[in-house]
Image: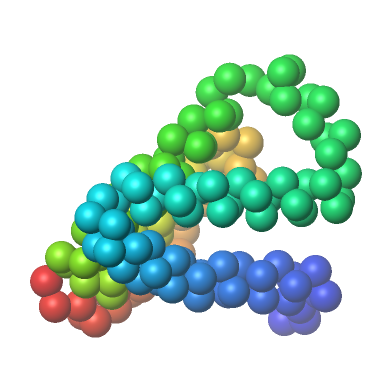
Amino acid sequence: MELSTDTVRYAAVMLAAGIGIPVLAALNAQLGTRLGSPAAAATCLFVVAFASSAAVLLATGPAALAGVGAAPKHLFLAGCLVAFYVLSITWAAPKFGVGNAVFFVLLGQLVSAAFIDHFGLMGARISPISPSRAAGIALMAAGVLLTQKV
């Protein structure tokens, strides 16, 4: 199987994002502990994230924001999901462990991603769950569970 340059680039960026998730969890959990409030830590994170996103937007073309008003309103629920993730991991990680928290997030991602791809939900490219894909997901889920002490 030959990998295209785009495939390698996408994989590398997503690998970096994956590496960042537990780092984010550990840093924000510590901030939440120091501040005594997961909500305060999440708010600080989102202020920094907003500033970072705004800088990238300004550098790459702020004209894209012109279409915000025409976008279907349900698409903005993604912001609520990000807030839920950040708040929940900031709250749970100090008590449950960063590894346990992130591994259960990963398990949830495996299941929901397979479901979304199988049915092509929310405009996703359809990728049916074949027996081999289901076995691979089950193997990954088993690996996630085996690596954790709950």
**Residue 44 drawn at (x, y percent):** 45, 51
- 11 and 64: which is toward the camera: 64
The answer to whether residue 136 is seen in the rendering is no
Which image quadrant is residue 143 in?
bottom left
**At 58% across and 74% down in the image, what residue appears?**
15
The residue most toward the front is 35
Q: Is residue 52 left or right of residue 2?
A: left
Q: Quadrant of the C terminus?
A: bottom left
**At 14% across and 78% down in the image, what residue appears?**
149
- 5 and 82: which is toward the camera: 82
Report the number of numbered marks: 0
Query: In this figure, which colouring scheme has been used for the structure?
Result: rainbow
Which image quadrant is residue 103 in?
bottom left
Which image quadrant is residue 105 in?
bottom left
Q: Is residue 145 above or below residue 93?
A: below
The answer to whether residue 39 is seen in the rendering is yes
**Residue 113 drawn at (x, y percent):** 46, 52
The residue most toward the left is 150
**At 50% across and 75% down in the image, what residue appears?**
19
**Residue 114 drawn at (x, y percent):** 45, 53
**At 81% across and 74% down in the image, what residue appears?**
4
Q: Is residue 57 above or below residue 93?
A: above
**Residue 39 drawn at (x, y percent):** 32, 45
- 6 and 77: which is toward the camera: 77
Q: Is residue 123 above or below residue 31?
A: above
Q: Is residue 41 above or below residue 73?
A: below
Q: Is residue 29 left or right of residue 36?
A: right
Q: Quadrant of the N terminus?
A: bottom right
